[in-house]
Image: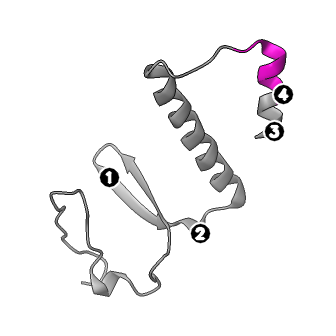
Amino acid sequence: MKNIAIIKISSKGQIVIPQEMRDDLKEGDKLVMIKNNEQIILKKADKFSKAFKEDLEFAKRTEDAWKRYEKGKFREVNFEDFIEQLKRW
């Protein structure tokens, strides 16, 4: 069956996509992984709309900012300066 394959995760968290599942994939392609409860979905990043890519970038920046905040690596700014910085993103 071409649509199902069993793969293993290495000790480094790496997986290999089986040859028969790589028809339209090539080296350097970016994939998006979506985890929902017990489901994991891989999708080529270029298949998403530009708006979705922007949402992913915003989510990544937000996650990075939260990690910096948790480590105490943040600075306080007043509201007006914060809005100006947002406009530059």
Give how far apart the Cα atoms at labels 4 and 2 are: 32 Å
Instruction: Kindly state the secondary structure of the residue where label 4 is placed.
Output: helix
Q: Are marks 1 and 2 in contact (CB under 8 Å)?
A: no
**Residue 49, position as x, y percentages in the image:** 67, 61
Image mark for residue 84: 4
Kindly report the distance in space between the C-alpha atoms of the residues bearing marks 3 and 2. 27 Å
Q: What amino acid type should be assigned to the residue bearing mark 4?
A: Glu
Q: Which of the two marks, 1 or 4, is nearer to us in this view? A: 4
Residue 3, picture quadrant: bottom left
Per the picture, the main secondary structure of the magenta-coloured stretch is helix
Distance in Å between CA atoms under marks 3 and 1? 36 Å
Up/down of 3 relative to 81, above or below: below
Q: Residues within 10 Å of mark 3 (few under 14, many from 20)?
A: few
- State which quarter of the image contains the C terminus: top right
80 shown above or below 38? above
- Label 1 and label 4: CA atoms lie apart by 40 Å
Badge 2, how many Cα within 10 Å: few under 14, some, many 20+? few
Front in this rendered view, residue 39 or 58: 58
Label 4 crowd bin: few (<14), some (14–19), many (20+), radius 10 Å: few
The residue at which mark 2 appears reads as 47
Q: What amino acid is at disc 2?
A: Lys
**Which of the image's four quarters has the N terminus?**
bottom left
Q: Nearer the viewer, mark 1 or mark 2?
A: 2
Residue under the point 26% across and 73% down: 16
Residues shaded magenta: 77-84
The residues bearing labels 1 and 2 have C-alpha atoms spaced at a distance of 19 Å
Q: Quadrant of residue 81?
A: top right
* Amino acid bearing label 3: Arg
Residue 39 numbered tag: 1
Q: Give the mark nearest the N terminus, 3 or 1.
A: 1
